[in-house]
Image (tube, coloured by chain):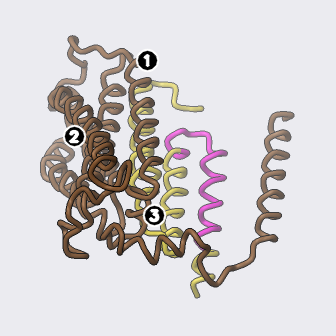
């Protein structure tokens, strides 16, 4: 009872806080200085049709590197605490899952992976990008595990993919220091024709690497959960 | 029109949030929490933020819901929180 009252007071306090923020808010008709710079110069400087992507990958690319690092640390810690039982086969024998799920997953998993790859490869043209594509790929992995709990293939590939894409990402970022204007500068490659798939310099490459890394990290978390001891 | 749609979405979202907290069964709670994320992503689209909406839909309502369901299925028996 006391606990509930405490929680209720806390929520009420938060509500009051947000209400104050809401009251002080005034709708602005034009962008602030930073936003206007991004909108006016982003497409010109980075060649990316999606302004959000130009901010996420180039202007504030260091923050994205930090996010990827946090995800990596989280995946490592989960893998460390959930010690897996690699040798012992899980009790659930293949064929125990429903036929419908199994057949459906055979059809759907490649399509889901393809959608994820599409989302991160087109990150500089359409909404979406590395994180979204990576999450879509990981949800394909879940379907794979649900259909066949005893699956063990691909674990090595996931780890190699994760390390490889992470190192290449940092490598490209450092290359920007020497070949272009600074860390994570995308102009180490030609900007190309605005709005085409192979444009915006290194952005599609970097976002694809981020997508692969996020997908591999989330999949390795799922692997750790799947193989955890009962 | 848009404001009315937003109002309906927010009311459903709040109802789902209360359901997620107050319902005894974990399974219903997890699905209700996924619904909160799903509606949040629709609201992001209405507010012209498709990038954020995609992240919310893929991670908030998709992956984390599935991950919770997966963990619940691994917990044998005691699923009444």
x, y percentage for residue A222? 33, 33
* Chain letter belonging to callout 1: A
The residues colored magenta run B8-29
Q: Position of residue B39 (x, y in %)?
A: 52, 64
User: Is the residue marked by circle 3 packed among few (<14), some (14-19), or many (20+) residues within 10 Å?
Assistant: many
Q: Quadrant of residue A161?
A: top left
C-alpha gap between disc 3 and disc 1: 32 Å
What residue did someone put label 2 on?
A: A144
Q: Colour of chain A?
A: brown
Residue A48 lies left or right of residue A42; in this view the side is left
Query: What is the x, y in percent for residue B21?
Result: 64, 45
The image shows residue A218, relative to residue B42, as above or below, that is: above
Instruction: Give the Cα separation between the discs numbered 3 and 2.
Output: 25 Å
Residue for badge 3: B53
Tell me, what hue is chain B? yellow
Name the front one of labels 3 and 2: 3
């Amino acid at each position: 009872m006391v606990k509930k009252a405490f929680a209720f007071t806390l929520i009420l306090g938060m509500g009051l806080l947000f209400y104050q923020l809401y009251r002080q808010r005034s709708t602005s008709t034009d962008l602030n200085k930073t936003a206007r710079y991004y909108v006016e110069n982003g497409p010109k400087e980075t060649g990316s049709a999606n302004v959000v992507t130009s901010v996420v990958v180039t202007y504030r690319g260091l923050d994205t590197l930090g996010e990827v690092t946090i995800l990596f640390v989280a995946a490592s810690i989960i893998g460390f605490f959930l010690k897996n039982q690699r040798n012992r086969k899980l009790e659930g024998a293949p064929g125990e899952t429903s036929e419908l799920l199994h057949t459906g997953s055979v059809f759907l998993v490649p399509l889901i992976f393809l959608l994820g790859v599409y989302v991160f490869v087109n990150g500089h043209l359409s909404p979406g990008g590395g994180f979204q594509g990576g999450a879509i790929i990981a949800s394909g992995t879940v379907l794979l595990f649900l259909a066949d709990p005893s699956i063990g293939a691909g674990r090595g590939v996931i780890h190699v993919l994760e390390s490889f894409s992470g190192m290449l990402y940092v490598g490209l970022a450092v290359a920007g220091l020497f070949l272009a204007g600074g860390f994570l500068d995308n102009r180490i490659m030609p900007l190309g024709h605005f709005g085409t798939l192979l444009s915006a310099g290194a952005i599609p490459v970097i976002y694809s690497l981020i997508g692969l890394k996020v997908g591999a990290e989330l999949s390795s978390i799922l692997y750790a959960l799947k193989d955890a001891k009962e | 029109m848009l404001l009315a749609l937003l109002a309906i979405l927010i009311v459903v979202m709040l109802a789902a949030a209360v359901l997620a907290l107050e319902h005894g069964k974990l399974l219903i709670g997890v699905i209700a929490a996924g619904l909160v994320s799903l509606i949040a992503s629709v609201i992001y689209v209405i507010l012209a933020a498709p990038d954020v909406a995609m992240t919310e839909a893929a991670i908030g309502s998709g992956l984390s819901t599935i991950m919770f369901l997966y963990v619940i299925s691994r917990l044998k028996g005691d699923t009444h929180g």
